């Protein structure tokens, strides 16, 4: 009996031993199998799993970062981006946002090393019981997914079999990458990197852009309910988008707030209940290339920045550069406001002036026949239709006249309507356009740049890209050459039109703006410029020579081609507003030409300075010549009947101002340049083409169309006491005896006795 019992025990013991052995074999097989599998994933065995990011890539994770354009006073002027993503550091994140994130998404974040075993078990339990209790991924795993594992370039052949197979491999990669991230970065760095890599829908990537897009704030300014909205979006940005699905977003926000209360972050029940009742108060502003206070400026300098980046092997749209500019966001905002305030009123006047008539005219004042038909053929829409249907196909005309839903620009806000391509062209050609720029004449720093009335609808830049005839705003360069030749601002000329002999035996005697060829009155050069006398300006050109005027203008800062012809004195060669202001600044800066510049330095994404920029300067004329021209320009404000004598007293009192208006033939272009001791600013107003203008010269002259922009701008600048731009006097030449007093100069007996070489 005992032997039988022993045999039974031995038999059962053998079975137990075999079971233990099998369990160990299975366990070891699983462990070895898992290790072999993970190693296979690591080395991408037979190309099944896809590549892993390099150790260097994991240790130095890169994003496609937008490059920031930053004003001189530290404000954002816009970004260059493929994906609108901008980084913040952990120090720039408010505690309320960090705590909301951790409590909602990974409350054991500071107690694991990238993988959370308990969260993993919770996720498995949720799948088995069909009662999801939350995901098993840690913040570190989600960061790994954002940075690397969703990259289709890292997929292997298994990924093509089934989405589940692809996701399993991705998950395994996340585990390995997470462990490496935890080894190489602090917890704070991982939090910052995670928030910088998340998508928040509406083209917003990263917490900085998300805060700007949904709440018009920087991350550090977010409160608890705003933080809860953004953290709630992380699980499904589209489903919990507060703009598109406000009910879903509110429900999710309150779910996040409930977690904060349950974990004791919100301590008082009354506070919790109060926050729950608050609505989501959005201040939505989509951060695309059409918005911002310096949209024209950002686009105007983009190609220049691309060339700079190409030389250094960088991508402007992906490198995360910090581009520091000379633009002052406050002056830029005042310039935008001044231009918009003036142009909305100008457009109303222009529309009332033309009523239902077409404003495009030939030089004789007749409507241009076939204007819209000829212009539509220059459009991209027309070219695309021709490529699709053929030039002679009736479908081209049919499609050009097909009305479609369209959002159009109005001065009262965007308007949804039904327009065809022809309707749209007809509508937009009737708008007056404008440009405005302001710069510091001593440093050359551009402080404000407004290239048009609305960048979203009118992309063309009227500061530097657009060139038009400057009219009388070119005259200071004519008089400047006279001052350099030894003329005095006080020298008097008779108001009579000279005669020029042209080729072919023809002659030309320029009239004044009113049509007369002179009154015969004797006027000082200062007064002649203030009254913008074409007759006397033409006499100056006769005496000093057109070639010399071209040379002087080039030295002063004009870069466009200038023809050395008699009509040069009336400003018939196209120039840009950018060039004109650079030239006028040379006068204010006592003859030192400082090339207008707008970039002060460029830093990489970590704040390391890649290059500092300094303005290019050269002595273009003597201090005495330059100051005589400043004195001449001051005549526009001080001489009776001058173009700027009616400036508001708020501008003129305790302040020295020089100014010049300009108006071209048929009032196609209206200009105004105003100079003070520390700001040279000016504007242009005109139609999209020179043929589009007022019928009456008086309505379209620069003093009426462009001067109000300068006035409004300067009043806003002087009203802001935080700005360094105060009223004051122009700098004088170093010679203390440089005094100009035209009151003591008597009229000469006749013009023929004048000899410029004897005058000073």
Image: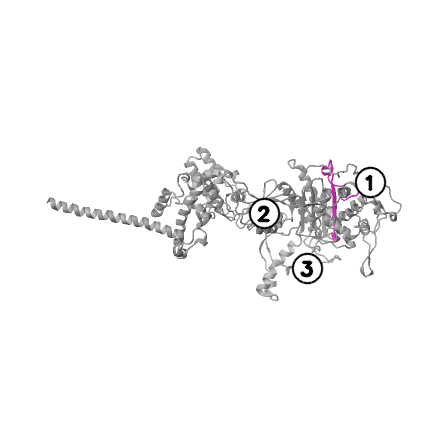
Separation (CA) of disc 1 from disc 3: 51 Å
Residue at screen point 44% across, 35% down: 265
Q: Residues within 10 Å of mark 3 (few under 14, many from 20)?
A: few
Q: How is the image coloured?
A: one colour
Q: Tag 1, which secondary structure?
A: helix
291 to the left or right of 570: left
How far across and how far down the image is residue 537, in percent? 80, 49
Marked residue nearer the N-terminal end (2 or 3): 2
In the rendered structure, find residue 742 and report the number of the disc placed on it.
Answer: 1
Marked residue nearer the N-terminal end (1 or 2): 2
Please identify, in this view, whether the residue under mark 1 or under mark 3 is nearer the observer.
1
The residue at the far right in this view is 749
Separation (CA) of disc 1 from disc 2: 51 Å
Please identify, in this view, whether the residue under mark 1 or under mark 2 is nearer the observer.
1
158 to the left or right of 561: left
Say if mark 2 contacts mark 3, CB within 8 Å.
Answer: no
Separation (CA) of disc 2 from disc 3: 32 Å
Tell me the quadrant of the picture where the N terminus can be found.
top left
Residue named by callout 2: 291
**Looking at this view, is 468 or 126 the one in front?**
468
How far across and how far down the image is residue 745, in percent? 85, 41
In the rendered structure, find residue 67 and report the number of the disc placed on it.
Answer: none
Tell me the quadrant of the picture where the C terminus can be found.
top right
In the rendered structure, find residue 371 and report the number of the disc placed on it.
Answer: 3
Q: Magenta span has 183?
A: no
How far across and how far down the image is residue 684, in percent? 70, 48
**Looking at this view, is 398 or 533 the one in front?**
533
Q: Which residues are magenta?
A: 640-666
Q: Tag 2, which secondary structure?
A: loop
Q: Is residue 526 visible?
A: yes
């Amino acid at each position: 009996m005992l032997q039988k019992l022993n045999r039974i025990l031995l038999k059962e013991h053998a079975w137990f031993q075999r079971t233990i052995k099998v369990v160990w074999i299975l366990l070891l097989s699983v462990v070895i199998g898992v290790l072999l599998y993970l190693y296979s994933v690591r080395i991408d065995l037979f190309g099944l799993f896809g590549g892993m990011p390099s150790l260097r890539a994991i240790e130095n994770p890169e994003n496609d970062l937008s490059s920031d354009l930053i004003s001189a006073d530290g404000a954002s002027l816009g970004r260059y981006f493929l994906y609108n993503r901008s980084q913040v550091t952990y120090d720039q994140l408010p505690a309320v946002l960090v705590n909301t994130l951790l409590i909602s998404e990974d409350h054991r974040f500071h107690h694991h090393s990238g993988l959370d075993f308990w969260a993993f078990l919770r996720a498995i339990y949720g799948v088995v019981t069909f009662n999801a209790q939350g995901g098993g991924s840690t913040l570190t795993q989600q960061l790994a997914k954002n940075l690397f594992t969703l990259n289709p370039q890292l997929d292997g052949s298994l990924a093509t079999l089934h989405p589940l197979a692809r996701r399993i491999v991705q998950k395994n990669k996340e585990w390995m990458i997470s462990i490496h991230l935890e080894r190489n970065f602090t917890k704070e760095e991982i939090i910052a990197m995670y928030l910088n890599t998340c998508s928040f829908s509406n083209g917003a990537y990263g917490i900085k852009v998300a805060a700007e897009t949904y709440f018009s704030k920087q991350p550090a300014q977010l409160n608890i309910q705003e933080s809860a909205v953004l953290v709630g979006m992380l699980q499904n940005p589209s489903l919990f988008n507060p703009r598109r699905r406000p009910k879903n977003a509110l429900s999710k926000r309150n779910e996040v707030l409930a977690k904060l209360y349950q974990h004791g972050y919100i301590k008082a029940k009354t506070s919790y209940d109060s926050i729950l009742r608050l609505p989501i108060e959005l201040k939505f502003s989509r951060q695309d290339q059409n918005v911002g206070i310096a949209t024209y400026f950002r686009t105007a300098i983009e190609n220049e920045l691309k060339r700079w980046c190409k030389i250094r092997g960088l991508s402007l749209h992906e490198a995360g550069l910090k581009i520091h500019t000379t633009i002052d966001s406050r002056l830029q905002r005042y310039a935008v406001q001044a231009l918009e305030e003036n142009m909305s009123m100008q457009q109303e006047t222009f529309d009332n002036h033309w009523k239902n008539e077409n404003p495009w005219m030939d030089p004789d004042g007749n409507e241009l026949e076939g204007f819209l038909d000829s212009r539509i053929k220059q459009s991209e829409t027309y070219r695309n239709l021709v490529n699709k249907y053929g030039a002679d196909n009736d479908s081209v005309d049919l499609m050009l006249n097909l009305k479609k839903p369209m959002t159009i620009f109005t001065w009262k806000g965007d308007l949804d309507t039904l327009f065809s391509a022809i309707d749209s062209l007809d509508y937009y050609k009737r708008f007056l356009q404008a440009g405005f720029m302001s710069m510091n004449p001593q440093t050359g720093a551009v402080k404000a740049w407004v290239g048009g009335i609305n960048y979203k609808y009118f992309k063309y830049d009227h500061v530097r890209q657009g060139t038009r005839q400057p009219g009388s705003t070119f005259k200071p360069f004519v008089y400047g050459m006279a001052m350099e030749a030894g003329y005095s601002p006080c020298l008097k000329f008779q108001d009579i039109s000279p005669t020029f002999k042209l080729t072919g035996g023809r002659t030309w005697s320029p009239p004044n703006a009113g049509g007369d060829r002179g009154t015969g009155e004797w006027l000082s050069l200062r007064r002649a410029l203030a009254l913008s006398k074409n007759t006397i300006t033409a006499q100056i050109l006769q005496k000093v020579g057109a070639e010399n005027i071209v040379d002087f203008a080039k030295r002063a800062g004009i870069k466009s081609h200038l023809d050395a012809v008699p009509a040069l004195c009336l400003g018939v060669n196209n120039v840009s507003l950018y060039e004109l202001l650079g030239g006028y600044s040379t006068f204010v800066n006592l003859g030192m030409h400082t090339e207008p510049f707008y970039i002060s330095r460029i830093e990489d994404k970590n704040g390391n300075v890649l290059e500092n920029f300094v303005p290019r300067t050269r002595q273009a004329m003597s201090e005495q010549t330059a100051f005589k021209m400043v004195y001449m320009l001051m005549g526009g404000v001080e001489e009776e009947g001058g173009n700027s004598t009616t400036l508001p007293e708020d501008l003129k009192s305790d302040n020295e101002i020089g100014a010049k208006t300009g108006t071209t033939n048929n009032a196609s272009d209206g200009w105004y340049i105003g100079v003070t001791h520390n700001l040279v600013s000016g504007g242009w107003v005109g139609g999209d083409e020179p043929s589009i203008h007022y019928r009456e010269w008086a309505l379209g002259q620069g003093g009426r169309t462009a001067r109000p922009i300068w006035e409004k701008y300067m009043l806003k600048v002087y009203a802001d006491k935080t700005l360094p731009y105060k009223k004051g006097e122009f700098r004088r030449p170093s010679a203390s005896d440089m005094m100009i007093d035209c009151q003591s100069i008597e009229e000469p007996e006749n013009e023929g006795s004048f000899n410029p070489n004897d005058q000073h």
